[in-house]
Image: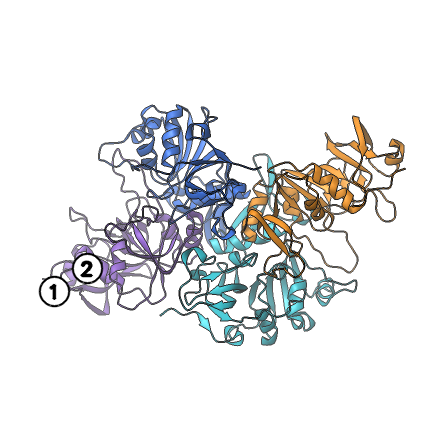
Chain colours: A purple, B orange, C cyan, D blue
Amino acid sequence: MVEPLSRNQIAWRAAQDLEEGMVVNLGIGMPVLASSYAPEGREVIYQSENGIVGVGPEAAEGNADPDLVDAGSRNVTLAPGGTVIDSAGAFAMIRGGHIDVTLLGGFEVAANGDLANWDAQVPNKGQLVGGAMDLAFGAKAVRIMMQHTTKTGAPRLLNACTLPLTAPGCVTRVYTDLAVVDVLDGGFVVREILSGMSQDELQAKTEAPLTFASDCKALDAPAGL
Amino acid sequence: MVEPLSRNQIAWRAAQDLEEGMVVNLGIGMPVLASSYAPEGREVIYQSENGIVGVGPEAAEGNADPDLVDAGSRNVTLAPGGTVIDSAGAFAMIRGGHIDVTLLGGFEVAANGDLANWDAQVPNKGQLVGGAMDLAFGAKAVRIMMQHTTKTGAPRLLNACTLPLTAPGCVTRVYTDLAVVDVLDGGFVVREILSGMSQDELQAKTEAPLTFASDCKALDAPAGL
Amino acid sequence: MIDKRVESVEAALADIEDGASVMISGFGGAGTPANLMRGLDATGAKDLTVIVNSLRFLEGQAPGLFADKRVKQAVCTAARGRGKTPSDYELQWQAGELDIDMCPQGTFAERIRAGGAGIPAFFTPTAAGVELGEGKEVRMFDGRPSVLETALRADFSFMRGAEADRFGNVRFRGSQANFGMAMAPASDVAIVEVQAFSDTPLRPEDIDLPGVYVERIVLVPDVGEILG
Amino acid sequence: MIDKRVESVEAALADIEDGASVMISGFGGAGTPANLMRGLDATGAKDLTVIVNSLRFLEGQAPGLFADKRVKQAVCTAARGRGKTPSDYELQWQAGELDIDMCPQGTFAERIRAGGAGIPAFFTPTAAGVELGEGKEVRMFDGRPSVLETALRADFSFMRGAEADRFGNVRFRGSQANFGMAMAPASDVAIVEVQAFSDTPLRPEDIDLPGVYVERIVLVPDVGEILG
């Protein structure tokens, strides 16, 4: 069987679905990697919730401007045509439905599109909600990037989330190391599955029942990412 | 008896009460004249509800910029340190209590500080509220400039307003062609009265009872304005 | 390549149909999208809802909207004609043919801002306890009454700026921004007429209205005479 | 002549007393008023309410606030310590000594914006129907549930900018504006530490935060190392 996708490969796969002219917010962690993999020549506008409209590549070594960071505190540059607004304005943009797609990390996604990605209920640790909830409620499309299962092998695609929800019924697509899964009419539909993995094998790693699209394809990503 | 104050003289008198560093919004008509008469060297910041923060003098003849107007559609300049924001921002400034004083025109003021200055109920004419209501509700101090009586001699300082209110209990001071009158504890207190006019004469032109301040002064303004 | 330019006012307005809602910026001539207003008149679209500060300025550029009774509802802060004789819209208002939602200007601006910011409703002290606020829900906050106001959105919005680039980024000059900054985010299709087009992206610090909020840019160097 | 400069951080913070509420801007180091945060620590003021995006950044510059239990309430979007061992504020939160109002970041920013804009409360869809929104008033608008959120205000606010003039006008660079643009209007006394002071008024188009919203400017060219 083909190896499960690496983090960068998941990011690559998610990036292929970003379309020309889309306004996209990338969550901290794996999602932000996607900005490196949008197909050549496709102009995507990356928004960051601390106010950047048009995030460019990370600043080159030695060229970092400490006054220009994205929501993940990375030293970034501005893309051509980019500008910076304030936080209240950036969230007005998010809440107001001006973000076409947000790619976010996830702990759990339920078959009805419920998302839990902010509070892992770690004992003795404080909470951190940040901008995840506004993005999950406000973006036109919420797509999740995560490992198909937890480190201990427990499924993350569930019948119902067990952790506190970020937003109900918001997720439209999930990219994992094993599959691309859509949320459709209250259920999971597999669009792509890792080459060589059987449907039963994928179902065994998934709590909620999976439907396989009639044109379900092989999940592939360039090697070496 | 001394002549009643002209419009410019009323504006002059109102301007004397504007203090260094105050943020002031001047209504259309007589109030806007006050910006010419603030005492020399006193820095007052004039805000205009279409977005100007720091209105300067009117543009010189032939030098008007059609893209820079104040709320009265006058071609203005920016004062040093001035800038321009948008309308939503300008009213956030007004509603948020950042305007120290607004000078507005008035139809009627009641002894409890009620103001009617937006809807004269002219038959067959549509309504026009503009920014008056936001200013009357939002400014820290609302001061009114108006003729003491109507053209037909009817009083404007009333026991209760007859026209639709702009805001209840908002007025702190009224400048008229005959007097400077404060609203204090639900009643009118005359601070200044036209030289040579008797208290009875002023009361005869005023519906609500007037109290005269123990240090009530003569209302004076430079001639020839 | 992203390029939000359209070739003409006509092309920019081609999909405005009967029943459309349109927000129109402008204050005292500054930022007034006079060409788009004239173009709206020329479309012949009717049953319109207009969201505009002053009906006088709208009638000035687009008299046919009122002469032909093509506006069914207006949300505005000023609905008074210039002369002593009633204007078309004053007559239609009196006859009950034109519904006017008269808003304090700050409430007008904030309702539009809310529409673009995903805030469905908010409380404001303005108009609480006075006739204009009658019928609105009132609630006390810190001992002060406020009225509930709902967000405004529209199918289209029009504004005029000084300069734009292919991303739809707009620079305003002077007091051109006024209502347009809030209207563009509050409409599905924001159309900006501009005096100049920049072949290179605007500098970050020169951008007032980010292109994310703008769908169409049309170059019309001359605003023409603005009547109002 | 208007001149909002004060000579030092100490002078700028001299009237911060026990029980004060303080808003603090900054995101990922940009716009972070590190000198004012250190200065707040040095005042010794206690029973504070802090309104700040991330407690980690506050503790980084002002560890005494938490080490000495001087914060009674925090309104924030992040209250997680860096390491695996609980931080002081995590321990105080668990012990019920520190009240934390955990807000989605957009709601946090909008509550502050409302505080400066005279909007006492607003409805937002964010957090409706999930655990974090429990206990809040819910209302449907256009078929979608929203929760009622109230405005935030504070006695003081701190932010860092690139340049200011005597009017208190501030220019931000990069992503320095973040929460500061909303915090200054929402506080009685907005204090801005700036990298540079301009002897001439800033150009109109360079002003991000109008001086109307700013009470004190303090020149501190070096922000120092920001820990967070």
Give how far across and how far down residue C89 sits, in percent: 70, 65
Q: Residues within 10 Å of mark 2 (few under 14, many from 20)?
A: many
Q: Residue D25 lies in what quarter of the image? A: top left
Q: Amino acid at mark 1?
A: Gly
Q: Is residue C71 above or below residue D109?
A: below
Q: Is residue C196 above or below residue D161?
A: below
Give how far across and how far down residue B54 sits, in percent: 58, 47
Secondary structure category for the residue under label 2: helix
Residue occupying the point 74% across, 33% down: B182
Residue occupying the point 20% across, 68% down: A217
Q: Nearer the viewer, mark 1 or mark 2?
A: 2
Quadrant where the N terminus of chain B sits is top right
**Residue receiving disc 1:** A196
Observer-nearest of B131 and C224 = C224
**Residue receiving disc 2:** A9
Give how far across and how far down residue B220 sits, in percent: 80, 36
Q: Amino acid at mark 2?
A: Gln
Q: Is residue C56 left or right of residue A7?
A: right
Residue D127 in view of the camera: no
Observer-nearest of A63 and B162 = A63
Image disc number at residue A181: none
Residue occupying the point 59% across, 60% down: B67
Of the numbered discs 1 and 2, the one sitting upstream in the chain is 2
